[in-house]
Image: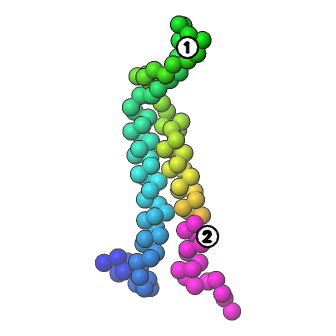
Amino acid sequence: MLLTLAPLAESFDMFIALAFCYIPPFIWLYFAYRSSRSGSRVAKKDPTSKGYTWVDSDENVPITKTGQFSMALLWFVLGSIFFWALLWPDHHDVWFIN
């Protein structure tokens, strides 16, 4: 069925490349959303000692402050570069034009 969408494609490698480049950022965004809604751990000054202790907080962290959001952006940018700069010309055989 997928080959009927791209009649000039000889195999599924283009669809596999699209899946690996563009589906994982959405998975990372889902995990970023979950972690931004689950509260956080913050460092509080401990009056009994001279240091800080980690305590659970009910405050939600903004989604842009999570590491998963950064990973989603990184994967999207690098996946786009990988797909459009490396795979697309290879798929269309434009490396060696006479």
The quadrant where residue 56 appears = top left
First of labels 2, 1 by sequence position: 1
For the C terminus, give its image quadrant. Answer: bottom right
Return the residue found at the far right: 98
- Give the magenta part as a residue range: 82-98
Q: Secondary structure at mark 1?
A: strand
The quadrant where residue 13 appears = bottom left
What residue does disc 1 label? 45
Query: Is residue 28 found left or right of 77 in the rendered image?
Result: left
* Residue visible at 66% across and 88% down in the picture: 97
* Residue visible at 61% across and 70% down in the picture: 85
Name the kind of residue labelled 2 in the image: Ala
Query: Is residue 31 found left or right of 92 in the rendered image?
Result: left
* Residue visible at 60% across and 64% down in the picture: 81
Q: Position of residue 58 (x, y in %)?
A: 40, 22
Point out the frontmost of discs 2 and 1: 1
89 and 48: which is toward the camera: 48
Is 1 located above or below residue 21 in the figure? Answer: below
What residue does disc 2 label? 85
Is 18 located above or below residue 1 in the figure? Answer: above
Q: Secondary structure at mark 2?
A: helix
Is 46 located above or below residue 60 in the figure? Answer: above
* Magenta residue check for 71: no
